[in-house]
Amino acid sequence: MSVINFSVSAAAAPSSDVTVIGAAKDEASVTLVGAENFTDEQLAALGVSGKAEGITRTLSTDGVSYAIVGLGSSTPSTDEWRDLGGAIGRGLNFVNSLELRLPVADIAAAVALLEGVALGAYEYAGRPAKGKLANVHLVTEISVSPAEIARIGVVTAAVIATRDLAATPANELYPAKFAEIAEKAAKTGNFKVEVWDEKDLAKDGYGLIAAVGMGSVRPPRLVKLSYEPKGASSHLAIVGKGITFDTGGLAVKPLGGMLGMKYDMTGAATVYAAMLAISQLKLPVRLTSYLCLAENMPSGSAMRPGDVFKSKNGKTVEVTNPDAEGRLVLADGLSAASELQPDLIVDVATLTGAARIALGARYTGLMGSTAGIAALQAATEIAGEPAWAMPLPKELRASLDSPVADLQNSKVGSTFGGMLVGGWFLSEFIGNKADGSKLEWAHLDIAGPADNEGAAYGHTPAGPTGVMVRTLVALAEGMAAN
C-alpha cells in the first residue's frame, strides 16, 4: 500500500477527491456534521441512518463529491474515532485524496481518527495494490503537531509490517528468512541484531528452541534485537513466539487445524515491529527483543512424546505434547531475557486455542505478575486493544509435574484451564531479582485477536490484525515517561 500523507489545519485542503462529513443519530433524528448542503429530506432519500461506520456517497449541487459516514453518537469515544477512521480507510481507499470534516473533540480523537484511516486502508503487500489513497487532510481547530503526525506514520507502519509478515506464506517466511529480514532492518535502524543458528543454539544451551526445530529441514533461529539509547533509565524486554509453520509435529494436526498455521509466528512479528517503532520514535527506554523462531514439522528427526530436553535456564522439560511447542521456544527466550534483569519482561504469543474459547476473537489473554499486569492493562487502554487479566490458580501448577523432568509441557487429556496452564509453564522460566523475588512479567496470549477470520470491521482487516503492536509502543512510552 502507498504511504498516506496526513495534514491537519483549520483551513480546507487545496483540493480533494472526496469530502468526508459525519451523520450523528440521536433518538429522534439524524444530524449532519461538517456541511449544511443537505436537507433532512435529502438525507432520508439517500438512506443516511447515522449508524456507526456506514458510508453513503453522493454529489451535492455545488459539485462536491461527499462521503457521509455514520458516527453513531454525536460524541464518539477515542476508540470509536479510530474505528470510524478505519471504516473511512476501507471504504474510500480507491480515491487519491480525502478531506475530513469531522467533529473530533481533542488531540487524542484526531490522532485516533487518522490512525484508523491508515490501518483501515491496509492491503497485503504480497498482492498488487488496488488502493491509491495518498493524501488525507483533517479540517479542525485542534492543533496536531508534526511530531504527532509523524508518530501516526511510524506506529501504523509497524502494525502493517506485522500484518504483512503474518500473511506471508510459510514457504517464503521461515526461520532463517525472518532472521535475514531483521538483520537487514538493523543495518538502517538504530538497533543491533544477533542471530543464533542451530549450531549456536546447541552450543549456548537453547535446548528447547533447538528441539522444536529439529524436525524441519529449515533449522531454527534465535534473533536478539537491542536498542540502547543514551539516558534510558528503564529496561523493557519482549519475547515473541515465532513458529513459522506449525503442523503439530508428530502430534499432527488435522487439516482444518493446520490451515492458518503460518500465523503462528505472529508473536515474533509483533515483537519485531514494536522494536522498529520504538527505536524509530527514539524513546528513551532500553529495549531488548527476542524472536524465537522454529518450524514445527513431523519427520524422523522430530521430537517425540516423552523426550526430555534442557532449557536455557537449566530446567528439564518432558515433551508430552509436540503440538504445545510455542511455550517451549518462549521458555528459552524468557530465560535469556531474565539473565538481563530488565524492569519488565513481556512475551507475546498465539499460544493456546483455549484463549480463543475463553475470550473470543477480540480479547487478548493477559497473565503475569501484579505489576506486569497493571502496566499492560494501562497500555492496552491507551491503545484501545482489549485484554482481559486471567488468574494463575495454584492448583493448576501440579498438572505440569513430570516423573522424569522438572516439568512437562502439557497435561495430555486435560481440558481444564488450557490458557492458564500455558501461563504457568512460562512463569517457570522467569528469573529472579537480586532480592530473590520474581522479575516483573506479563504474558499476552493473542491466539484470539491475532487473526480475524470474519469480515473486516473498524480499523481491523480480515486476516492478520497486528494486534498489540500499539500496546507495546504505549507501554514503552509509559516506561520512558516514568
Image: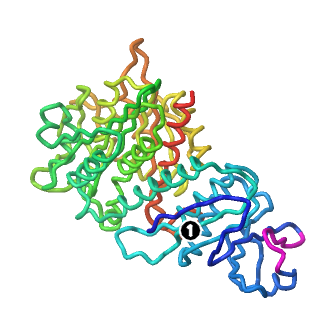
Q: Is residue 376 left or right of residue 110?
A: left
Question: x, y percentage for residue 81?
Answer: 67, 58
**On the image, numbered disc 1 is attached to which residue?**
135
- Taking the spot 76% from the left edge, 83% from the top edge, the residue there is 47
Residue 443 visible, this orientation = yes
Q: How is the image coloured?
A: rainbow
Residue at image coords 32%, 46% = 326
Q: Is residue 172 above or below residue 379?
A: below
Judge from the rendering whether residue 88 lies leftward or rightward of residue 173; answer left or right.
right
Residue 184 position, x and y percent, is 26, 50
- Is 219 located above or below residue 401 in the figure? below
Q: Secondary structure at mark 1?
A: strand
At 28% across and 40% down in the image, what residue appears? 328
Quadrant (top left, top right, bottom left, bottom right) of the N terminus = bottom left
Tell me where the magenta segment starts and ends, as one range: 28-37
Q: Is residue 423 above or below residue 67?
A: above
Could you tell me which quadrant the C terminus lies in? top right
**Quadrant of the rendered image containing residue 236:** top left
Q: Position of residue 116 (x, y in %)?
A: 59, 60
The one of 364 and 379 positioned closer to us in this rendering:
379
**Residue, far front:** 14
